[in-house]
Image: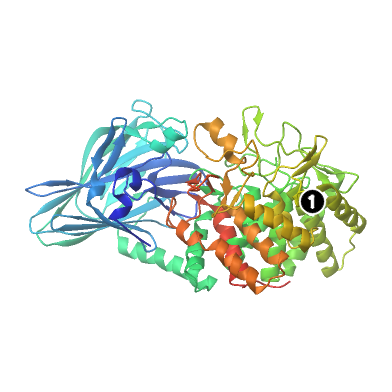
Amino acid sequence: MRFGKGEWRNFERGIEKEWLVTNGLGGYASSTIIGVNTRKYHGLLVASLSPPVQRNLLLAKLDERLETPQRTYNLATNHTGGGVTEFGFVHLQQVLFNPFPTFVFSFGDITLQKQIFMIYGENSTVILYRVINGAEPAVLRLTPLVNCRDFHWTVRRGQLNFCRENIPYGVAVKVVPRNPALRLVCSEGKFHGRDDWFYDMFYVEEQRRGLDAREDHFIPGDFTISLEPRETKTITFIATLEEVFTLDGRALLEVEIRRLQELVKRAGYRSVLARQLVQAADSFIVYRQSTGAKSIIAGYHWFNDWGRDTMIALPGLTLVTRRYDDARDILLTYARYCKDGLLPNMFTDAGREPLYNTVDASLWFFWAAWKYLQYTRDHTFGREVIYPVLKEIVYHYIKGTHFNIKVDEDGLLAAGSPELQLTWMDARVDHWVVTPRHGKAVEINALWYNALCVLRELAVRYGDAFSYQDLLEKHRESFLREFWFEESGYLYDVVGEQGKDASLRPNQVIALSLPFTVVDAGRGRRVLTRVWQELYATYGLRSLSPGDPRYRGVYSGDRWQRDGAYHQGTVWSWLIGPFVTAWRQVHHYSPASRLQAARFLAPFQDQLRDHGVGYISEIFDGNEPVVPRGCIAQAWGVAEVLRAYVEDVLEIRPQF
């Protein structure tokens, strides 16, 4: 992907697009394409101290200036409380992603290229410069802006005490008495120490979110690199927590490029969209230190690894990409942590008990496990590891487990309470439950039916008795009787003591897209017609119909405003996957349905060039022009677009 000066014709346009590179540990580097940090989450090194969590901002920026006898060219772009104070982006000529972000500056008769990437498996960021100097001698000055705080916070001068120590090729900086030390090293030039501060950096995105938007950063000194007239020089700058490192940036870059190329080659797709999404998928598969296994980060910049998101995203991120060992690793981890029939909703920091407050993570485990067995035919793992956990989940859900999760007399699955929301629509602000869905939710019962069917199929395959056929039939009858809204031609969203909720929401689409579904094709086509008419919005499905008086079409403002819109009209990218799969299934995989599926997914080629470049955004405004919001890179968004594109458009899918 290439971007030219038209993308940053002014400052406001330049901050609309952000880049992200990751390290397989939950750490990352990220900023806007014009180099100004607009979020407290932006930085060149956000290190994960207990992978994939305990993420700390250590290096916020690295500002460049090039000095000649006649003139100083300031390449930095910064925004403070007083406004935009430095406009280095005017010298920015091109931004390339090949595959890592590369920034090409042109000023006078000088060209400077800067490429940013991370070393996989290390908390290390490499900034590789290539400078083609002009007719005069010059000095390149690099000024690091250092911090040491949790990436959710902001700090001001006086809150942290920094100390620095000169080391070979640079400086080590740490907060007294905190560890570890941040090492800033450069392959060329000299380091000149000085204790200084960058004051009042302003984060416009945090202001829009109603959060603290100002911060100070420590400046430990400058690196200066001399350039002879007409000299071309390659310079490697590394910010790292590692004690041992190499300063051969080109060799490091070659290793990282080769690793990504191998992932794309393994997946084996020729389509540009598929290849780009395979590469994007890699950023979410991370190592979890507390379990010693792989996990899936739900989204960047701020999410941890969540059970529900992991199970939904697993097929797209690991199976469609043919990363079968990673899929097995993740399934094994969650299987080990199954407790009273519940899978973790979220893993917390190291050493703390996972949170189990979800009804559907365990049910999505059936979907992920079924897809894994379809793709791998690894029935030794299925019989010995997966199948016992599936039986345990069904047993506890029937018997009744935590959070009021229990099968009712009619065979339908109920969960939650007015104060306790266990489905994916779980937004809550203090004591305000934004989208109450306790009782018998439509997608939960669709997943429950699918779970029973998966268990039945595996019981037959593994020569075991299936004891729930009567329950399965009772559930099927009750589902169609209780959820089908004949007058309007779609499914009720929730059935419970409060009655039947006729809100037109996308959850019913899940009921049509699962491997085993209660709803017949005729009803399914009626449902999808209503969904297409009222919920479809280019990059996903609205979480509530615009015709509903509770609909909120713009996701912005403070926490109350944002969470109040989160599931009340906001568009979710991941829902395009179930929608496309349901479309193909209810139309019996006709050639016409394949063409329509391709039309539904075609806009995502453009979405990869927006918001988080190379990724799929978490959410969008429900109102046109469906502006991207939330996380710039979302795991289940990338996963479901990729899975639906490969399975339902390219028609590359395994058969059980």
Residue shown at 78%/45% (left/top)?
340
Q: How is the image coloured?
A: rainbow
- Whole-percent x, y for residue 75 in the image: 23, 47
Q: Residue furthest right?
A: 470
Q: Position of residue 608 (x, y in %)?
A: 46, 58
- Residue with the most extreme top position: 158
Seen in the picture, residue 415 relative to 186 is either above or below; the reply is above
Q: Amino acid at mark 1?
A: Ile
Q: Quadrant of residue 6?
A: bottom left
Visible in this render: residue 296? no
Above-or-below relation of 150 to 105: above
Camera-side residue of 624 and 480: 624
Total numbered labels placed on residues in the image: 1
Tell me if mark 1 has few (under 14), some (14-19) or many (20+) residues whose alpha carbon lies within 10 angstroms of its own: many
Dot 1: what SS? helix
Q: Is residue 8 above or below residue 94?
A: above
Looking at the image, which is closer to me, 336 or 653?
A: 653
